[in-house]
Image (spheres, rainbow, N blue to C red):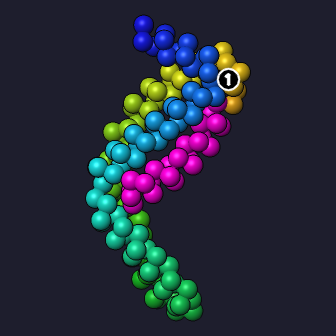
Amino acid sequence: MALEFLTSLIQSNPKTSVIIIALAVTFLSMLVTKFLTNQEKMRELKTRQTACQKLMKDVKGDTAKMQKIQSEMMQCSAEMMKMSFKPMLITFIPFILIFTFIRGAFAGTSISSTWFWYYLGIGLASSFLFRKILNVA
């Protein structure tokens, strides 16, 4: 019953619906990321990576130093990837279910072939906005 109501609501206002869905999914994703990752550690790793990138520019000719710096950058990247894996595991299945539902809901609408591109554009823009508002690293 609730799914039928949502489907009819989406089909009656497809553009507004895709905006609301994209904002809601992105916001939920940011909340999960914020609360399941160590934000201070993420900021520290990003700062270290930025410092390493600056050092790489300074030691362009010295291969040994460049390899050492690259090694540290790889360690930072691996650590950041480990930290971001937990939120991804938690959001993956619900988001797959949501996308399966909305794909079917948009099937009979005026934006049936382009809803994903609307979603992607709105999702990327709102992701940037929510990261700033929620102070997510």
Q: Is residue 79 visible?
A: no
The residue closer to the viewer here, 38 or 86, is 38
Q: Is residue 78 above or below residue 72?
A: above
Residue that appears at 46% across and 76% down: 50
Residue that appears at 66% across and 15% down: 108
Quarter where residue 120 is shown:
top right
Residue that appears at 30% across and 65% down: 40
The residue closer to the viewer here, 15 or 95, is 15
From the top left corner, tell me how far across and down residue 32 is, in percent: 34, 44
Residue at the disc numbered 1 = 112
Main structural element of the magenta stretch: helix, strand or loop?
helix
Q: Magenta segment: does it hold 129? A: yes
Residue that appears at 45% across and 57% down: 132
Secondary structure under the numbered disc 1 in the rendered image: loop
**Residue most extreme to the top:** 1
Q: Is residue 43 left or right of residue 129?
A: left
Q: Magenta segment: does it hold 116? A: yes
From the top left corner, tell me how far across and down residue 116 is, in percent: 62, 33
Q: Which residues are magenta?
A: 115-137
Q: Is residue 81 left or right of residue 101?
A: left
From the top left corner, tell me how far across and down residue 106 is, in percent: 61, 21
